[in-house]
Amino acid sequence: MRLIIISTLSVIIGTCSSSPPLLDQVLEIGELRVVTRDSPTAYTITPDGPSGPEFDLAQAFADDLGVKLVIDPVVSVSEILPKLLSGKSHMAAAGLSSTDIRREHLNFGHPYKFVDVHMIYKLGMGKPKSLSDILDRSIEVIADSNHVDLLSNIQNSYPTLQWDENNNTEVADLLTKVAMGEIDITIANSPDFDIQRHFYPDLRIALNLNTDDPIAWAFPKDIGDTLLARADDFLIKSYRSGLLTQIHDRYYGFTEKFDYVGTRNFIRHFKTRLPRYREIFEKAGNEWGVDWRLLAAIGYQESHWLSQAKSPTGVRGIMMLTLDTAAYLGLDDRLDPKNSIFGGAQYFARQVERVADTVAEPDRTWMALAAYNVGFNHIKDARTIAEWNDGNPDTWVDISKALPLLSQRKWYSRVPYGYARGWEPVLYVNNIRAYYNILLWLTEKEIIESVAEVEINEQTADT
Protein backbone atom coordinates (compact mmCIF):
# COMPACT_ATOMS: atom_id res chain seq x y z
CA MET A 1 0.00 0.00 0.00
CA ARG A 2 2.80 2.44 0.86
CA LEU A 3 4.46 1.74 -2.52
CA ILE A 4 1.17 2.49 -4.28
CA ILE A 5 0.83 5.74 -2.34
CA ILE A 6 4.41 6.81 -3.08
CA SER A 7 4.11 6.10 -6.81
CA THR A 8 0.74 7.83 -7.01
CA LEU A 9 2.05 10.86 -5.15
CA SER A 10 4.98 11.17 -7.52
CA VAL A 11 2.58 11.45 -10.46
CA ILE A 12 0.46 14.04 -8.66
CA ILE A 13 3.47 16.12 -7.63
CA GLY A 14 4.55 16.23 -11.26
CA THR A 15 1.22 17.60 -12.43
CA CYS A 16 -0.43 19.45 -9.55
CA SER A 17 1.31 22.76 -10.18
CA SER A 18 -0.87 23.37 -13.21
CA SER A 19 -4.10 21.98 -11.75
CA PRO A 20 -6.85 24.47 -10.88
CA PRO A 21 -8.34 24.42 -7.35
CA LEU A 22 -10.40 21.31 -6.69
CA LEU A 23 -13.67 23.20 -6.25
CA ASP A 24 -13.13 24.90 -9.62
CA GLN A 25 -12.55 21.50 -11.23
CA VAL A 26 -15.81 20.17 -9.82
CA LEU A 27 -17.79 23.18 -10.97
CA GLU A 28 -16.16 23.19 -14.40
CA ILE A 29 -16.96 19.56 -15.24
CA GLY A 30 -20.33 19.70 -13.45
CA GLU A 31 -19.65 16.54 -11.46
CA LEU A 32 -18.77 15.72 -7.86
CA ARG A 33 -16.94 12.40 -7.96
CA VAL A 34 -17.20 10.62 -4.63
CA VAL A 35 -15.62 7.35 -3.59
CA THR A 36 -17.51 5.46 -0.92
CA ARG A 37 -17.89 1.96 0.48
CA ASP A 38 -20.51 -0.48 -0.67
CA SER A 39 -21.91 -0.90 2.83
CA PRO A 40 -25.24 -0.45 4.69
CA THR A 41 -23.67 2.36 6.71
CA ALA A 42 -22.45 4.20 3.60
CA TYR A 43 -23.98 3.32 0.20
CA THR A 44 -26.11 0.52 -1.17
CA ILE A 45 -28.32 -0.10 -4.19
CA THR A 46 -31.90 -0.97 -3.25
CA PRO A 47 -34.95 -1.77 -5.42
CA ASP A 48 -35.83 1.93 -5.06
CA GLY A 49 -32.39 3.12 -6.16
CA PRO A 50 -29.22 4.30 -4.37
CA SER A 51 -29.46 4.56 -0.61
CA GLY A 52 -27.33 4.99 2.50
CA PRO A 53 -26.38 7.77 4.92
CA GLU A 54 -23.20 8.73 3.06
CA PHE A 55 -25.06 8.76 -0.26
CA ASP A 56 -27.84 10.99 1.07
CA LEU A 57 -25.39 13.48 2.52
CA ALA A 58 -23.14 13.51 -0.56
CA GLN A 59 -26.19 13.94 -2.81
CA ALA A 60 -27.30 16.93 -0.76
CA PHE A 61 -23.79 18.42 -1.07
CA ALA A 62 -23.78 17.92 -4.84
CA ASP A 63 -27.20 19.58 -5.04
CA ASP A 64 -25.83 22.48 -2.99
CA LEU A 65 -22.98 22.85 -5.48
CA GLY A 66 -25.36 22.54 -8.42
CA VAL A 67 -23.51 19.59 -9.94
CA LYS A 68 -24.19 15.91 -10.65
CA LEU A 69 -23.17 13.33 -8.05
CA VAL A 70 -21.05 10.49 -9.45
CA ILE A 71 -20.57 7.65 -6.97
CA ASP A 72 -17.62 5.27 -7.21
CA PRO A 73 -18.32 2.42 -4.77
CA VAL A 74 -15.50 0.19 -3.56
CA VAL A 75 -15.48 -2.97 -1.49
CA SER A 76 -12.46 -2.41 0.75
CA VAL A 77 -11.07 0.56 2.63
CA SER A 78 -7.70 0.02 0.97
CA GLU A 79 -9.18 1.08 -2.40
CA ILE A 80 -10.20 4.54 -1.20
CA LEU A 81 -6.82 6.22 -0.78
CA PRO A 82 -5.44 5.36 -4.25
CA LYS A 83 -8.59 6.70 -5.91
CA LEU A 84 -8.21 10.02 -4.11
CA LEU A 85 -4.48 10.31 -4.69
CA SER A 86 -4.83 9.46 -8.38
CA GLY A 87 -7.45 12.16 -8.91
CA LYS A 88 -10.17 9.70 -9.97
CA SER A 89 -12.32 10.90 -7.06
CA HIS A 90 -12.66 14.40 -5.64
CA MET A 91 -13.51 13.28 -2.10
CA ALA A 92 -14.29 10.24 0.03
CA ALA A 93 -17.58 9.89 1.90
CA ALA A 94 -17.10 6.48 3.45
CA GLY A 95 -17.40 6.78 7.21
CA LEU A 96 -13.66 7.31 7.61
CA SER A 97 -11.96 8.05 10.92
CA SER A 98 -9.25 10.68 10.87
CA THR A 99 -6.25 8.52 11.82
CA ASP A 100 -2.60 9.62 11.97
CA ILE A 101 -1.64 7.46 8.98
CA ARG A 102 -4.49 8.79 6.84
CA ARG A 103 -3.70 12.40 7.75
CA GLU A 104 -0.24 11.92 6.27
CA HIS A 105 -1.85 11.79 2.82
CA LEU A 106 -5.35 13.27 3.19
CA ASN A 107 -7.10 16.28 4.59
CA PHE A 108 -10.21 15.67 6.68
CA GLY A 109 -13.13 18.05 6.89
CA HIS A 110 -15.42 19.01 9.73
CA PRO A 111 -16.63 15.88 11.61
CA TYR A 112 -20.28 15.21 10.86
CA LYS A 113 -20.75 12.45 13.44
CA PHE A 114 -18.96 10.75 16.30
CA VAL A 115 -18.91 7.01 16.92
CA ASP A 116 -17.73 4.65 19.63
CA VAL A 117 -15.41 1.78 18.73
CA HIS A 118 -16.36 -1.52 20.37
CA MET A 119 -14.65 -4.87 20.78
CA ILE A 120 -17.43 -7.40 20.18
CA TYR A 121 -17.86 -10.97 21.44
CA LYS A 122 -20.72 -13.48 21.63
CA LEU A 123 -22.76 -14.00 24.78
CA GLY A 124 -21.86 -17.31 26.38
CA MET A 125 -18.32 -17.36 25.03
CA GLY A 126 -16.82 -15.63 28.07
CA LYS A 127 -16.61 -11.86 28.27
CA PRO A 128 -13.09 -10.44 28.00
CA LYS A 129 -12.78 -8.18 31.02
CA SER A 130 -9.42 -6.70 30.06
CA LEU A 131 -7.05 -6.58 27.10
CA SER A 132 -5.02 -9.43 28.55
CA ASP A 133 -8.11 -11.66 28.19
CA ILE A 134 -8.08 -11.39 24.38
CA LEU A 135 -4.56 -12.67 23.81
CA ASP A 136 -5.71 -16.27 23.28
CA ARG A 137 -8.86 -15.36 21.30
CA SER A 138 -9.28 -15.48 17.52
CA ILE A 139 -9.63 -11.89 16.25
CA GLU A 140 -10.49 -10.71 12.75
CA VAL A 141 -10.86 -7.11 11.53
CA ILE A 142 -11.17 -5.15 8.30
CA ALA A 143 -7.80 -4.61 6.62
CA ASP A 144 -6.49 -1.03 6.37
CA SER A 145 -9.12 0.20 8.81
CA ASN A 146 -8.64 2.29 11.94
CA HIS A 147 -9.38 -0.94 13.82
CA VAL A 148 -6.02 -2.27 12.67
CA ASP A 149 -4.38 0.87 14.03
CA LEU A 150 -6.08 0.34 17.41
CA LEU A 151 -4.87 -3.25 17.59
CA SER A 152 -1.36 -2.17 16.61
CA ASN A 153 -1.32 0.30 19.49
CA ILE A 154 -2.52 -2.41 21.87
CA GLN A 155 0.21 -4.72 20.57
CA ASN A 156 2.83 -2.26 21.82
CA SER A 157 1.79 -3.21 25.36
CA TYR A 158 0.85 -6.81 24.58
CA PRO A 159 3.44 -8.08 22.06
CA THR A 160 1.84 -11.56 21.79
CA LEU A 161 -1.44 -10.13 20.50
CA GLN A 162 -2.32 -11.57 17.07
CA TRP A 163 -5.17 -10.96 14.64
CA ASP A 164 -6.25 -11.59 11.06
CA GLU A 165 -6.99 -8.81 8.57
CA ASN A 166 -9.66 -9.32 5.90
CA ASN A 167 -9.61 -7.12 2.82
CA ASN A 168 -12.74 -8.50 1.13
CA THR A 169 -15.46 -8.36 3.74
CA GLU A 170 -17.73 -6.01 5.64
CA VAL A 171 -17.93 -5.30 9.35
CA ALA A 172 -21.43 -6.79 9.18
CA ASP A 173 -19.92 -10.05 7.88
CA LEU A 174 -17.39 -10.16 10.71
CA LEU A 175 -20.13 -9.57 13.26
CA THR A 176 -22.00 -12.48 11.67
CA LYS A 177 -18.89 -14.66 12.07
CA VAL A 178 -18.75 -13.76 15.76
CA ALA A 179 -22.44 -14.57 16.18
CA MET A 180 -21.93 -17.93 14.41
CA GLY A 181 -18.93 -18.78 16.58
CA GLU A 182 -16.49 -18.77 13.65
CA ILE A 183 -14.28 -16.16 15.33
CA ASP A 184 -14.14 -14.98 18.93
CA ILE A 185 -13.79 -11.23 18.52
CA THR A 186 -14.04 -8.40 16.03
CA ILE A 187 -14.03 -4.62 16.25
CA ALA A 188 -16.97 -2.52 15.08
CA ASN A 189 -18.03 1.09 15.16
CA SER A 190 -21.20 1.75 17.11
CA PRO A 191 -23.49 2.27 14.05
CA ASP A 192 -22.54 -1.14 12.61
CA PHE A 193 -23.01 -2.84 15.96
CA ASP A 194 -26.32 -1.09 16.66
CA ILE A 195 -27.73 -2.43 13.38
CA GLN A 196 -26.38 -5.97 13.58
CA ARG A 197 -27.37 -6.65 17.19
CA HIS A 198 -31.00 -6.56 16.04
CA PHE A 199 -30.21 -9.52 13.80
CA TYR A 200 -27.88 -11.28 16.23
CA PRO A 201 -29.03 -10.42 19.75
CA ASP A 202 -26.26 -12.53 21.32
CA LEU A 203 -23.62 -10.02 20.21
CA ARG A 204 -22.17 -8.10 23.12
CA ILE A 205 -19.67 -5.32 23.79
CA ALA A 206 -16.58 -6.64 25.54
CA LEU A 207 -14.58 -3.42 25.74
CA ASN A 208 -14.83 0.14 24.44
CA LEU A 209 -11.62 0.91 22.60
CA ASN A 210 -12.51 4.48 21.70
CA THR A 211 -15.33 6.93 22.35
CA ASP A 212 -16.50 9.84 20.25
CA ASP A 213 -14.24 8.94 17.34
CA PRO A 214 -14.77 11.70 14.73
CA ILE A 215 -16.02 10.65 11.29
CA ALA A 216 -15.37 13.04 8.41
CA TRP A 217 -15.11 13.38 4.65
CA ALA A 218 -11.60 13.06 3.21
CA PHE A 219 -9.92 15.07 0.42
CA PRO A 220 -6.61 14.93 -1.47
CA LYS A 221 -4.01 16.81 0.53
CA ASP A 222 -1.82 18.62 -1.96
CA ILE A 223 -4.28 20.34 -4.31
CA GLY A 224 -5.70 22.99 -2.02
CA ASP A 225 -8.63 23.06 0.38
CA THR A 226 -11.28 24.90 -1.65
CA LEU A 227 -13.63 21.90 -1.89
CA LEU A 228 -12.99 20.99 1.74
CA ALA A 229 -13.88 24.51 2.87
CA ARG A 230 -17.09 24.45 0.84
CA ALA A 231 -17.93 21.02 2.29
CA ASP A 232 -17.36 22.30 5.84
CA ASP A 233 -19.74 25.20 5.23
CA PHE A 234 -22.31 22.75 3.88
CA LEU A 235 -22.00 20.38 6.85
CA ILE A 236 -22.33 23.17 9.39
CA LYS A 237 -25.40 24.43 7.53
CA SER A 238 -26.79 20.86 7.44
CA TYR A 239 -26.37 20.52 11.19
CA ARG A 240 -28.22 23.76 11.81
CA SER A 241 -31.02 22.93 9.34
CA GLY A 242 -31.59 19.49 10.84
CA LEU A 243 -30.54 17.55 7.71
CA LEU A 244 -27.91 15.55 9.60
CA THR A 245 -30.47 14.61 12.23
CA GLN A 246 -32.96 13.53 9.56
CA ILE A 247 -30.40 11.32 7.83
CA HIS A 248 -29.36 9.77 11.14
CA ASP A 249 -32.98 9.02 12.01
CA ARG A 250 -33.65 7.56 8.58
CA TYR A 251 -30.94 4.92 8.87
CA TYR A 252 -30.32 4.51 12.58
CA GLY A 253 -33.48 5.70 14.33
CA PHE A 254 -34.83 2.16 14.69
CA THR A 255 -31.60 1.01 16.41
CA GLU A 256 -31.96 3.30 19.42
CA LYS A 257 -34.39 0.97 21.17
CA PHE A 258 -33.04 -2.54 21.64
CA ASP A 259 -34.79 -5.32 23.52
CA TYR A 260 -32.65 -8.46 23.75
CA VAL A 261 -35.47 -10.78 24.80
CA GLY A 262 -37.96 -9.19 22.40
CA THR A 263 -35.59 -9.53 19.44
CA ARG A 264 -34.90 -13.19 20.16
CA ASN A 265 -38.63 -13.85 20.44
CA PHE A 266 -39.29 -12.03 17.17
CA ILE A 267 -36.77 -14.15 15.28
CA ARG A 268 -38.25 -17.30 16.84
CA HIS A 269 -41.79 -16.24 15.91
CA PHE A 270 -40.61 -15.53 12.35
CA LYS A 271 -39.92 -19.28 12.10
CA THR A 272 -42.91 -20.59 14.05
CA ARG A 273 -45.86 -18.18 13.65
CA LEU A 274 -45.34 -16.13 10.50
CA PRO A 275 -45.37 -19.09 8.05
CA ARG A 276 -49.11 -19.56 8.77
CA TYR A 277 -49.91 -16.04 7.57
CA ARG A 278 -47.04 -15.12 5.27
CA GLU A 279 -48.91 -15.83 2.04
CA ILE A 280 -51.80 -13.65 3.19
CA PHE A 281 -49.41 -10.79 4.03
CA GLU A 282 -47.78 -11.16 0.60
CA LYS A 283 -51.11 -11.11 -1.25
CA ALA A 284 -52.42 -8.16 0.79
CA GLY A 285 -49.21 -6.23 0.22
CA ASN A 286 -49.42 -6.88 -3.51
CA GLU A 287 -53.06 -5.76 -3.69
CA TRP A 288 -52.55 -2.53 -1.72
CA GLY A 289 -49.06 -1.60 -2.91
CA VAL A 290 -47.36 -2.08 0.45
CA ASP A 291 -44.24 -4.12 1.18
CA TRP A 292 -45.63 -7.28 2.78
CA ARG A 293 -42.79 -7.22 5.30
CA LEU A 294 -43.93 -3.82 6.54
CA LEU A 295 -47.46 -5.20 6.93
CA ALA A 296 -46.04 -8.17 8.82
CA ALA A 297 -44.07 -5.82 11.06
CA ILE A 298 -47.28 -3.93 11.84
CA GLY A 299 -49.01 -7.24 12.57
CA TYR A 300 -46.26 -8.29 14.95
CA GLN A 301 -46.31 -4.99 16.80
CA GLU A 302 -50.09 -5.25 17.11
CA SER A 303 -50.58 -8.90 18.04
CA HIS A 304 -47.30 -10.85 17.81
CA TRP A 305 -48.99 -12.65 14.89
CA LEU A 306 -51.76 -14.10 17.04
CA SER A 307 -55.03 -14.22 15.11
CA GLN A 308 -57.24 -14.39 18.23
CA ALA A 309 -55.56 -11.47 19.97
CA LYS A 310 -57.86 -9.11 21.89
CA SER A 311 -57.20 -6.01 23.93
CA PRO A 312 -59.17 -4.46 26.80
CA THR A 313 -59.88 -1.44 24.56
CA GLY A 314 -61.79 -3.56 22.04
CA VAL A 315 -59.30 -3.93 19.21
CA ARG A 316 -58.97 -7.45 17.84
CA GLY A 317 -57.17 -9.74 15.43
CA ILE A 318 -53.70 -9.88 13.94
CA MET A 319 -53.85 -6.21 12.82
CA MET A 320 -55.83 -5.13 15.92
CA LEU A 321 -58.61 -3.30 14.12
CA THR A 322 -61.18 -1.32 16.09
CA LEU A 323 -64.87 -2.02 15.62
CA ASP A 324 -65.30 1.33 13.85
CA THR A 325 -62.37 0.66 11.52
CA ALA A 326 -63.71 -2.79 10.68
CA ALA A 327 -67.12 -1.28 9.89
CA TYR A 328 -65.44 1.40 7.75
CA LEU A 329 -63.62 -1.35 5.83
CA GLY A 330 -66.72 -3.51 5.55
CA LEU A 331 -65.34 -6.39 7.63
CA ASP A 332 -67.71 -8.56 9.65
CA ASP A 333 -65.10 -10.78 11.36
CA ARG A 334 -61.98 -9.10 12.74
CA LEU A 335 -60.59 -12.38 14.06
CA ASP A 336 -60.42 -13.98 10.63
CA PRO A 337 -56.70 -13.72 9.62
CA LYS A 338 -57.42 -12.88 5.97
CA ASN A 339 -60.01 -10.23 6.88
CA SER A 340 -57.69 -8.70 9.44
CA ILE A 341 -54.56 -8.61 7.28
CA PHE A 342 -56.30 -7.36 4.13
CA GLY A 343 -58.21 -4.84 6.25
CA GLY A 344 -55.06 -3.64 7.93
CA ALA A 345 -53.32 -3.29 4.56
CA GLN A 346 -56.21 -1.26 3.18
CA TYR A 347 -56.36 0.96 6.25
CA PHE A 348 -52.61 1.58 6.23
CA ALA A 349 -52.63 2.38 2.49
CA ARG A 350 -55.38 4.90 3.24
CA GLN A 351 -53.20 6.59 5.85
CA VAL A 352 -50.33 6.84 3.36
CA GLU A 353 -52.66 8.58 0.89
CA ARG A 354 -53.74 11.08 3.54
CA VAL A 355 -50.20 12.21 4.36
CA ALA A 356 -49.37 15.55 2.74
CA ASP A 357 -47.84 15.34 -0.74
CA THR A 358 -44.92 17.42 0.48
CA VAL A 359 -43.74 14.58 2.73
CA ALA A 360 -41.12 12.34 1.08
CA GLU A 361 -40.27 8.75 1.84
CA PRO A 362 -39.45 7.22 4.23
CA ASP A 363 -40.96 9.95 6.46
CA ARG A 364 -44.27 9.45 4.66
CA THR A 365 -44.39 5.82 5.77
CA TRP A 366 -43.44 6.64 9.38
CA MET A 367 -46.21 9.25 9.60
CA ALA A 368 -48.74 6.82 8.13
CA LEU A 369 -47.71 4.24 10.74
CA ALA A 370 -48.21 6.79 13.48
CA ALA A 371 -51.64 7.61 12.05
CA TYR A 372 -52.49 3.89 12.02
CA ASN A 373 -51.81 3.90 15.76
CA VAL A 374 -53.06 7.23 17.06
CA GLY A 375 -55.38 8.48 14.30
CA PHE A 376 -54.66 10.82 11.43
CA ASN A 377 -56.20 13.88 13.07
CA HIS A 378 -53.61 13.79 15.83
CA ILE A 379 -50.90 13.72 13.17
CA LYS A 380 -52.41 16.91 11.77
CA ASP A 381 -52.24 18.47 15.24
CA ALA A 382 -48.61 17.36 15.60
CA ARG A 383 -47.78 19.04 12.28
CA THR A 384 -49.24 22.26 13.63
CA ILE A 385 -47.21 22.01 16.83
CA ALA A 386 -44.04 21.26 14.84
CA GLU A 387 -44.57 24.48 12.89
CA TRP A 388 -45.15 26.44 16.12
CA ASN A 389 -41.79 25.14 17.35
CA ASP A 390 -40.02 26.19 14.14
CA GLY A 391 -39.73 22.56 13.05
CA ASN A 392 -40.41 20.99 9.68
CA PRO A 393 -43.83 19.28 9.64
CA ASP A 394 -42.75 17.22 6.62
CA THR A 395 -40.07 15.33 8.57
CA TRP A 396 -40.64 12.44 10.96
CA VAL A 397 -37.86 13.76 13.19
CA ASP A 398 -39.86 16.87 14.05
CA ILE A 399 -43.23 15.11 14.12
CA SER A 400 -41.82 12.57 16.60
CA LYS A 401 -40.87 15.49 18.84
CA ALA A 402 -44.27 17.13 18.53
CA LEU A 403 -46.46 14.07 19.12
CA PRO A 404 -45.54 13.58 22.82
CA LEU A 405 -46.55 17.20 23.47
CA LEU A 406 -50.17 16.20 22.77
CA SER A 407 -50.24 14.74 26.28
CA GLN A 408 -49.52 18.17 27.82
CA ARG A 409 -52.39 20.57 28.46
CA LYS A 410 -50.20 23.49 27.37
CA TRP A 411 -50.27 22.04 23.84
CA TYR A 412 -53.32 19.83 23.39
CA SER A 413 -55.61 22.61 24.57
CA ARG A 414 -54.53 24.69 21.57
CA VAL A 415 -55.13 22.17 18.77
CA PRO A 416 -58.45 20.99 17.27
CA TYR A 417 -58.33 17.30 18.20
CA GLY A 418 -57.06 17.63 21.75
CA TYR A 419 -55.35 15.16 24.04
CA ALA A 420 -53.49 12.07 22.86
CA ARG A 421 -50.99 9.70 24.43
CA GLY A 422 -48.53 11.09 21.92
CA TRP A 423 -45.48 9.16 23.08
CA GLU A 424 -47.16 5.86 22.12
CA PRO A 425 -47.12 6.34 18.31
CA VAL A 426 -43.45 7.33 18.49
CA LEU A 427 -42.58 4.08 20.27
CA TYR A 428 -44.95 2.24 17.93
CA VAL A 429 -43.17 3.50 14.82
CA ASN A 430 -39.70 2.80 16.23
CA ASN A 431 -40.68 -0.77 17.09
CA ILE A 432 -42.14 -1.42 13.65
CA ARG A 433 -39.05 0.03 11.98
CA ALA A 434 -36.90 -2.38 13.98
CA TYR A 435 -39.10 -5.38 13.12
CA TYR A 436 -39.24 -4.34 9.47
CA ASN A 437 -35.46 -4.12 9.18
CA ILE A 438 -35.07 -7.55 10.78
CA LEU A 439 -37.62 -8.96 8.31
CA LEU A 440 -35.72 -7.40 5.41
CA TRP A 441 -32.55 -9.07 6.62
CA LEU A 442 -34.20 -12.43 7.27
CA THR A 443 -35.92 -12.57 3.88
CA GLU A 444 -32.85 -11.40 1.97
CA LYS A 445 -30.92 -14.13 3.77
CA GLU A 446 -33.52 -16.62 2.51
CA ILE A 447 -32.82 -15.53 -1.07
CA ILE A 448 -29.06 -15.89 -0.63
CA GLU A 449 -29.46 -19.35 0.91
CA SER A 450 -31.86 -20.36 -1.86
CA VAL A 451 -29.40 -19.29 -4.57
CA ALA A 452 -26.59 -21.13 -2.80
CA GLU A 453 -28.72 -24.29 -2.61
CA VAL A 454 -29.50 -24.09 -6.33
CA GLU A 455 -25.80 -23.72 -7.15
CA ILE A 456 -24.94 -26.73 -4.97
CA ASN A 457 -27.66 -28.82 -6.66
CA GLU A 458 -26.39 -27.80 -10.11
CA GLN A 459 -22.84 -28.73 -9.18
CA THR A 460 -24.05 -32.07 -7.83
CA ALA A 461 -25.99 -32.73 -11.03
CA ASP A 462 -22.91 -31.95 -13.12
CA THR A 463 -20.84 -34.48 -11.22
Image: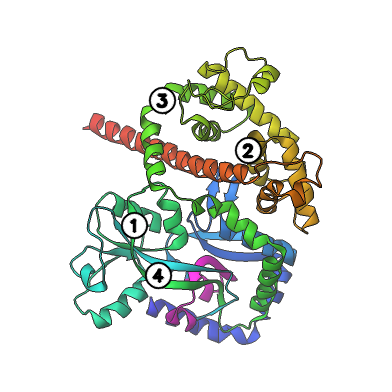
Please state which amino acid type lies under the numbered disc 2.
Answer: Leu
Q: Viewer-proximal residue, 29 or 413?
A: 413
What distance separates the C-alpha of mark 4 from that of mark 1? 21 Å
User: Residues at badges 4 and 1 in contact (C-beta under 8 Å)?
Assistant: no
What distance separates the C-alpha of mark 3 from that of mark 4? 41 Å
Label 4 neighbour load within 10 Å: few <14, some 14-19, many 20+: some
Left-right relation of 200 to 425? left
What distance separates the C-alpha of mark 2 from that of mark 1? 31 Å
User: Residues at badges 3 and 2 in contact (C-beta under 8 Å)?
Assistant: no
Residue 146 in sight from this viewpoint: yes
User: Which image quadrant for residue 167?
Assistant: bottom left
Give yes or no for residue 151 being in the magenta stretch.
Answer: no
Kind of element beneath mark 4: loop
Q: Earlier in the sequence, mark 1 or mark 3?
A: 1
Give yes or no for residue 91 being in the magenta stretch.
Answer: yes
Residue 217 in the image, given as x and y percentages of width and height? 57, 71
Question: Which mark, residue 134?
Answer: none
In the image, the segment drawn in magenta is 81-104
Residue at 67% from the left image edge and 19% from the top image edge: 329
Question: Which mark, residue 275?
Answer: 3
Q: Which residue is mark 2?
A: 369
Q: Which residue is mark 1?
A: 204
Residue 457 in the image, given as x and y percentages of width and height? 28, 31
Residue 69 in sight from this viewpoint: no
Q: Viewer-proximal residue, 9 or 48?
A: 48
Q: Earlier in the sequence, mark 4 or mark 2?
A: 4
Kind of element beneath mark 2: helix
Viewer-nearest of discs 3 and 2: 2
Q: Earlier in the sequence, mark 3 or mark 2?
A: 3
User: Which image quadrant for residue 390?
Assistant: bottom right
Residue at 40% from the left image edge and 51% from the top image edge: 197
Residue 229 in the image, given as x and y percentages of width and height? 67, 78
